[in-house]
Image (cartoon, helix red, strand yellow):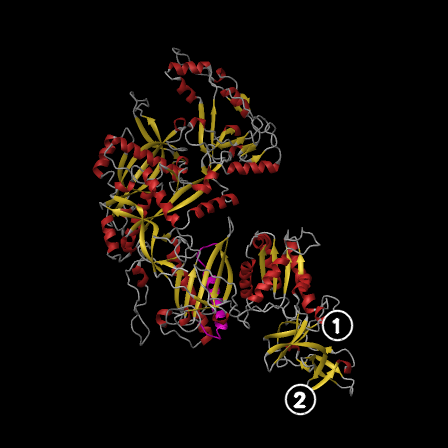
Amino acid sequence: PMERPTQLSVKTNYFKVNFDQVGEMIQYEVQIHDAVRKKKKDADGNIIEPWEFEFALKEVRGVAKEVHVEKVGQLSRRILAALNRENGRAGNIPPLTFDGSRMAYAPQRLFTEETAESRRQTNVASGSGSGRGDSGRYGPADTGNFNAPQAPSTLYNDYYVKAKSTCDESDEMADRVKSYWYRIRLTEVGTIPLRHVLENLTRHQIRDQEELNKVERLRQALDVMLKSGSFSVMHAPGKSPRRFYFKEEEQESIIGRNLGSLFRDGRSTYEPLVGISQAIRICTNGGVFVNADSCINFFDREYFYQPQGRPLQDRTPVRLLDRREATICGVRVRDLNRKIEDRKLREDIKKAIENVTFHVEYERTPTPEWLDRQRDRGKSDAQIRRMCVFTRRNQKMKRDAKKENLGIFWSADDPREHSFAFQPRPPRRKDGEPEKEVKPEDLPPPVTHTIASYFRERYGIELKYPHMPCVHIGKGEWYPIEFMFQAFQKSRDANSTTHVKSILSYYDENAGTYCVENVTRLMSKMMQLQHDDVFRQFGLRRSDEPVELTAKVLQVPSLAFDGDVGANLRNGSWDLRDKRFWRAAELNSFAVIDFDSARSDPNRPPQSRRFMDNVLRVMKRHNMSMPRNVDYNIALENVTVISSGHNPESVYIAFRQAIDRARDFYLMDRTRYFRNNKVWFKTYALNPIGQACDALIIPPETTHGDNCSVYGMLPADVHFQTHEIRSRVGDQEGEARIMVKVRAQGSREIILDPFNFKYCPDSRSHMGFNPDRKEWLPVDFHSYIYKVYGPADTYVTEQEVQARPKLLLDITWQVERVAMVFCYLRDDSTDTYSQVKMMGHYEYGVPTQCIVSKNFGKQRNPDQYCSNIALKCNTKLFNKWNNAMAWKTQDPTQPGEGIPWVNEAPTMVIGIDVSHGLGQDSISVVAASACMNPSCIQMAQTVKVQSKSDIISRQVMTGITKNLTMQFYQYNNNMLPQRVLVYRDGVSEGQFTTLMTTEVSYMKKAFYDIIEAIRGPDFTCPNAHNCKKNGCCFCTPLMTYVICQSQHSVRIVPSRPHPKDKNVPSGTAVDEVIMDYRDGFLATKDVPKEHPPGGSAMAVFEQPHEFGYDFLLTAQ
């Protein structure tokens, strides 16, 4: 094996941001309102000639209609892009950097008080305005803001621009989409002094909250800059996206081999797109980096795939109604020429249309009069054809409040579904005719139309499928489904098995060092597309080379099996072959439920038989104790239940049958297997003082019925008597213990205790234990004999007993039913698995081990698979008496057992995670585990439920802490932990501060309560004045709270990979250069300034301003 290094040169997916010309960054708040442009009128209400225009805000019930940018990110980006285009035409105005949120940035001031005033005066006709806002409303006017805390007012400027609300300017049909006016108000919030912030970061001079605010505002600004340059050249779905996807024409060179076949599928209505996710990271010592990573998602196609090089006009759009496949949005329809009546089909179609974004497009048949009129206006034939096309872009189905809140009519030509009265226009006035007033009686009478007849009469369009549905898109507009085409959007159902496998195959293709190389290639391509680099406008420069640094490689822990046989660890895995477990558990009995053989030939052995033969053999090889005196083949025939498991009831019945069969075979001996072989079944039972010990089951003579008692015998030194007998000699009664008379080698007769006598199924012979030689020797069974309870060794033979001996020790409620139930599953679906676990844990209290048939069947080395199963079984069969552990963990350089640091003092290691219900489920499940021993192998668990929240509530955290601590206390012979190491998962980055101020305090309070309860009411904290019974470091265990984030985007690979391994070794740690800066001063501000009487002031073993937040640890 390769020698493990202590340090390793690695490359990361971080790219340095260099500050060439450091200046200031101007921050603006963005407000957008709907506006209208009106012709100016004079005092008499007449329109001024030549026309002049003025602007006003649209109002709804007297309130200006605002565009909420946080809800409509794409629309706000279109509006701000229009502003940049207008400013670009004006010249000498720097572009605005934005991402669609409320904040935007510029490298210079877009306006000053002087220029804003002149703009207001000179550009009134174009609708610009300016002024000062209310004092105290925005950044510079807010008291305490870092930029200008004493600013008396704020400066804003208004801009009026036209933008398209439903598509980008680059859309091929943009010229046929109406534009709307919007007012943009930019309010200057403040400036971000780049040089000042960077110098403070580099010199570790972040001393207060004000300086931290500067750092955070800088990060937000750089994040907006990072996204702003990609909107025009890449797909960016969402309101404020972090993931950008390359457009279709760029995908051919980057999508790779595995995803490429799916991308080039000419019949698929969706496509995979590769993109890049980016985020700004301000790291140790003031370093600023772009953290980039590849990403994949599936999108609905607007056009079917077409190989590159073919004309764009040859592309085929994706229709919602597919005539060839007879489907609507993928839902098959029996007949496109008949109205859909089936309720289930209607519901499926409705749901499918709700999940898709679509375009509406149709072409009218012009009348000769209209054509002549357009030609008279100088329109070319191409322009006229374009004018005949009507379109609505990127629409969704909406419910019509005026039509009983419906979103679909199920036929375009059925008046029972929908009809309406249409008022034709009056005849058009001919050129030269004087304008005259049109009276109501001069108007043509209204005409009642269906949607199909309306398009026929109004636009000359004869619907091909008049009996198919019509969809409402808002504002009373209904269109036939045949006019609708699928629009580009992120797919709603991209979680199918095919999608997941395709994505995983892409990441497999780009694993190891290829991961960072692929990200570097994507970064370079994106920067080539961004011709006008936003960073350059601010005096910044992005590197296209990944950062290299030196990582630490942690020491590999040492594992020892039975006989101190070590294991060769490599990347967190090792081989279990030929290893005997350190302390093996006993599998005294078992039952099997086979969910895979219900459809098999009943005359053939069940599918599970091969697995059970393998796993029992492997368990024995790992030193696990197998059922004593039991022939496995006979046992499997009697304790295996075959079930379909197709519903919960069948699983319940199968589980009950398996438990009953195990009881009949092992405890009742209804097959007379143990009687015929002159032995007893060995198991565990509770002794008279409540402790577990070995027990032999004495089956009753009569086993009819299900309520027979279970009798047994315990070791002689625990409980001697087994029977009450009456001897023929002297007609004496007394209590006795059944014994076994055997013939050993040399024809000597020996009397053995039943615990020293066993049956070997392989050789079909008996063995007896010789206590002098401490070994098992072959013997021949002779007869049973009874040893009378008393000071003298008095024996009574079976022939001397008058009647059937009476059994004495009823252990029905003290003996375990069955040690483990093996469940052989057909597949890895969670339904049957969940039911099995429910039955085992809650109904019968029996450990279960599930095996998936297809996983075992495809193993080329079944023994390795069975070794992993044996490892799980050994752990599940652990109890206080066998203390089973597959291995022990130790530091080879130090004596003793356990993980370094954990074994230096009583330490409890706790892992906590929170998972949430899906959708509208309002429940969160909090699960926690704690290590009971220094090797961190023996675990205790607890589960709690709370209202849906990432932060654990006081009640739940207190309950978890007390539960696990008391289990640790009992396991370790009434010893409390001195240190606690907590690993907390399931927390987002924005909740770190909340978590540290709530959950940690809850745990400390719980520890204090436990210590107070154990030590009594006289217990007081040495730091009682500051502690106030809430728990502190003087009276509760020292706590280390580690927040884990497995869903991070940091990638590290070796700079110079080994030919056989292109990943970094497990245990590679990075704790500098690319780790986030940390508010170190906050880590010490809450340390109590006071200290206990007689104690010295507290020392903080961390530099208050040493940044590095905190470390990355890899695992494979």
Labels 2 and 1: the sequence-earlier one: 1
Q: Secondary structure at mark 2?
A: loop
| Camera sees residue 416 | yes
Do the residues bearing badges 2 and 1 touch, measured as CB atoms within 8 Å?
no
The quarter of the picture where the C terminus appears is bottom left
Q: Which residues are magenta?
A: 948-976
Q: Is residue 79 left or right of residue 318?
A: left
* Residue 1086, position as x, y percentages in the image: 32, 64
| Camera sees residue 299 | no
Tally of numbered discs: 2
349 up-or-down from 932: above or below: above
574 vs 988, nearest the viewer: 574
Question: Please, what is the dominant secondary structure of the magenta stretch?
Answer: helix
The quarter of the picture where the N terminus appears is bottom left
Residue corresponding to mark 2:
791
Q: What separation in Å lies between label 2 and label 1 (alpha carbons)?
A: 30 Å
Q: Which residue lies at the image location 54% right of the left edge and 58% below the top edge? A: 865
429 vs 97, nearest the viewer: 97
* Residue 1039, position as x, y percentages in the image: 39, 66
Identify the mark at residue 701; answer none if there is no mark. Answer: 1
Q: Residue furthest front?
A: 746
Mark 2 residue crowding within 10 angstroms, few (<14) / some (14–19) / many (20+) = few
